[in-house]
Amino acid sequence: MIKLKEILSAFEHHAPFSLQEDYDNSGIQFGDPESEVTRGLVCIDITEEIIQEALEKKCNLIISHHPLIFRGIKKLTGKHYTERVLIEAIRNNISMISVHTNLDSVMNGVNMRLARKIGLTDLKVLQARKGLLKKLVTFCPTDHAENVRAAIFQAGAGVIGEYDCCSFNLDGKGSFRAGDNSTPFVGEKGHIHYEPEVRIETILPAWLESRVVGAMIEAHPYEEVAFDVYPLDNSYEKVGPGMVGVLKKPLTEKDFLTMIKEELGAPFVRHSEFTGKEIRKVAVCGGSGSFLRDHAMAAGADAFVTADIKYHDFFDVKNKMLMADTGHYESEQFTKEILYEIVSKKITNFALLISDQSTNPVRYF
């Protein structure tokens, strides 16, 4: 029996929901976390047609990229499509989970999939986010430091770029006096004790703090564990919107636009004026990514592929960079693959289907 909260946990492990933007509403849209789910349907948007498809395929869970509920709902009268979809989901007891901007921000997410689809390599996050890292410092008896470090690393701390098990260790001497109600690991009650200790410092993502601290306390021999957690202002190079990489071989601007049009199945591509330069380094952002325009230029991108670009934004890249708008749905369509893979790899005995219909609301004449 698979519970809704287990599906949610799989996504939390891959793309923590704490990474979603303030305006977003990722997570459970409808459903009891403790309820059983037997079959899921993966899509980009939850529409009335998707609800019907879920019913036909006997799915009691829908997993989407875009949340159904963005704004507050005061009434359920069926006046708006969101209300109608929600009414049908409630009526048929179909749970719904959405995984949106948190999946946009992780390294192995929406933008990496888009970048790989158009042949980019040497991928890096375009705008690394700050304020997501913390430093953990603890003090441990010398003979137990190795076990404590191992527990901390196993819980996810100590990763810097492509390196793991990273820490700084300093030998020193700790002091304490055990009280009458204590059970000291070393020393005697009522007497000051000096113990050779190791100061262990390591780094961790903020969303892993409770897990890492819990693992440290579990492995630590002391009854009362001394530790500090400091917020850091460092950029976290593995988290943030957009991605930048390079093509295996340079393309002319015309050939580049032809390539992305074919790879994404876009009816057409809106683009800025040609610069006359070859395209080698490319920045991408699935969905509405015009806010990353300056970051793309600062990264030295020859081209920037995204969607929902406003008219005046095209002026700002003249003679600097080719900017291409492939369409919102077109740039995020492969997200269905990611959602499917996350659940399938984590929960192998859960039946999951990918919707065979496009929910793109935009039509071209």
Image: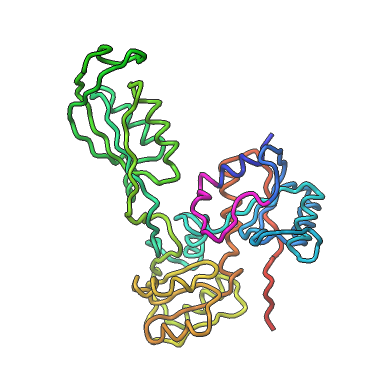
Q: Give x and y (percent) for residue 310.
A: 53, 80
Q: Give x and y (percent) for residue 155.
A: 41, 36
Residue found at the very far left of the displayed protein: 172
In the picture, measured across the screen, residue 361 lies left or right of residue 183, that is right
The residue under the point 59% across, 54% down is 26
In the picture, measured across the screen, residue 314 lies left or right of residue 185, that is right
Quick check: 102 above or below 156? Answer: below
Depth check: 123 or 294 in front? 294
Image quadrant containing the N terminus: top right
The residue under the point 69% across, 66% down is 359
Q: Can residue 62 be seen from the camera position used here?
A: yes
Quick check: 176 above or below 305? Answer: above
Q: Give x and y (percent) for residue 123.
A: 40, 61
Question: Which quadrant would residue 287 be assigned to in this image?
Answer: bottom right
* Residue 22 belongs to magenta span: yes
Q: Can residue 164 be seen from the camera position used here?
A: no
Question: Which quadrant would residue 241 be assigned to in this image?
Answer: bottom left
The residue under the point 52% across, 60% down is 110
Q: Which residues are magenta?
A: 12-29
The residue under the point 51% across, 72% down is 306
* Residue 88 belongs to magenta span: no
Question: Which quadrant would residue 65 be assigned to in this image?
Answer: bottom right
Q: How is the image coloured?
A: rainbow
